[in-house]
């Protein structure tokens, strides 16, 4: 892949160059010394992946990400020092469309370089076509089971900000369980859950192995494994299927809802790059569930909802601001 670097620190740029040199398939497209320069470079030469620092002079990585995703969208990986201290800026950048984040590798640090290359590999899969998945056979709901309500939501690039707005618009007495699958590394999941909780009228926390979704509670997938709904109604994390490189997979969770949920359910697919979640949303529609995709105008990255629209997976295509009210109406 052609990979660009936006970083004002010569030692950091050299560390990135050396890490990328370990993978012959990667080549450096260009290097920008600040955010404004990266925006200008993207106008004439859009890379496959842009490694974006957060803390740069003239224009920081958050604003540069916003401008690039608005004008010349590409896959952006935040690569910066001390992610823990800059976690809010990471979420801001993800809200504008950045896909993931990783600490800047250290010269001579094999482990850090390997982590960077793994993230780039995952992004390469995400922006490609991906592997075809087998169709899940819908299982009809049992007639005698109690009525339960579930809202299953998937998001990727641009997702944190979209999720925050959607949750902010849901009322305190929302009468359904909510489960979120956001493409985010496990190291950021706890911070993201806390941040979403501060924006939401409903409590938000990470989903735990073996627990069941509960009305009025928002659960966020919180590991680098996939999350599934099991036949007994509990949630579980699993490394399989390995073919789904981007983890956690929205398709895997949506398909498990098709297989095992026995009440009412609504599937929602928000902003994101690639096509994860589109096929799972289609399976939810085929099962008879209401399915909603975010519209192009309100998406930071119109990839996953576009894929869903192309395969007629969404019963309704709505602006982000309308989705919360539609959920309330549908579950009234």
Image (spheres, rainbow, N blue to C red):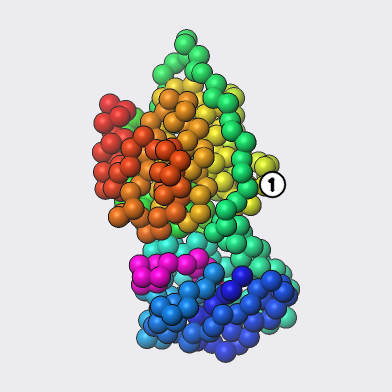
Q: Is residue 123 visible?
A: yes
Which contiguous range is marked in magenta? 66-83
Q: Quadrant of residue 97?
A: bottom left
Q: Which residue is mark 1?
A: 242
User: In the current view of this chain or complex, which residue is farthest to the front?
Assistant: 310
Q: Is residue 118 left or right of residue 306?
A: right
Residue 86 against residue 332 in the figure, above or below:
below
Q: Is residue 147 left or right of residue 210?
A: left
| Horizontal and vertical percent position of residue 232 | 58, 24
Q: Residues within 10 Å of mark 1 (few under 14, many from 20)?
A: few
- Residue plotted at (50% across, 26% down): 261
Question: Image quadrant for the C terminus?
Answer: top left
In depth, the one of 97 and 1 nearer the eye is 1
Residue 163 against residue 105 in the figure, above or below:
above
- Residue plotted at (69% across, 46% down): 242
The magenta stretch spans residue 11 = no
- Residue plotted at (26% across, 43% down): 322
Question: Image quadrant for the N terminus?
Answer: bottom right
Q: Quadrant of residue 120?
A: bottom right
| Horizontal and vertical percent position of residue 124 | 60, 62
| Horizontal and vertical percent position of residue 194 | 43, 53
| Horizontal and vertical percent position of residue 166 | 33, 47
In depth, the one of 48 and 150 nearer the eye is 48
Q: Is residue 107 left or right of residue 194?
A: right
């Amino acid at each position: 892949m052609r990979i660009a670097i936006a970083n004002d620190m010569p030692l950091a740029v050299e560390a990135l160059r050396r890490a990328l040199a370990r993978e012959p398939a990667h080549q450096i497209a260009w290097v920008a010394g600040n955010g404004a320069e990266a925006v200008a470079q993207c106008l004439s030469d859009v890379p496959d992946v842009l490694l974006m620092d957060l803390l740069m002079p003239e224009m920081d990585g958050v604003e540069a990400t916003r401008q690039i995703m608005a004008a010349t969208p590409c896959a952006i990986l935040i690569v910066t020092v001390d992610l823990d201290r800059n976690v809010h800026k990471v979420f801001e950048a993800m809200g504008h469309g950045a896909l993931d984040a990783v600490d800047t590798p250290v010269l001579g640090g094999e482990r850090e370089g390997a982590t960077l290359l793994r993230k780039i590999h995952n992004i390469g899969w995400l922006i490609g076509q991906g592997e075809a998945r087998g169709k899940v056979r819908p299982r009809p709901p049992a007639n005698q089971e109690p009525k339960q309500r579930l809202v299953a939501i998937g998001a990727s690039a641009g997702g944190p900000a979209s999720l925050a707005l959607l949750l902010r618009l849901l009322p305190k007495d929302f009468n359904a369980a909510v489960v979120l699958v956001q493409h985010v590394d496990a190291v950021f999941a706890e911070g993201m859950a806390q941040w979403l909780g501060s924006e939401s009228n409903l409590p938000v926390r990470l989903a735990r192995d073996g627990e069941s979704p509960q009305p009025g509670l928002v659960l966020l997938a919180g590991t680098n494994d996939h999350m599934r709904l099991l036949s007994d109604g509990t949630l579980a994390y699993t490394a399989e299927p390995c073919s789904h490189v981007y983890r956690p997979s929205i398709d895997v969770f949506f398909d498990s809802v098709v297989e095992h949920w026995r009440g009412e359910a609504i599937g929602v697919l928000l902003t994101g790059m690639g096509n994860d979640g589109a096929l799972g949303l289609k399976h939810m529609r085929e099962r008879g569930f209401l399915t909603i995709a975010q519209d192009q105008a309100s998406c930071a990255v119109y990839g996953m909802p576009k894929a869903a629209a192309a395969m007629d997976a969404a019963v309704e295509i709505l602006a982000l601001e309308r989705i919360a009210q539609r959920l309330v109406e549908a579950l009234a």
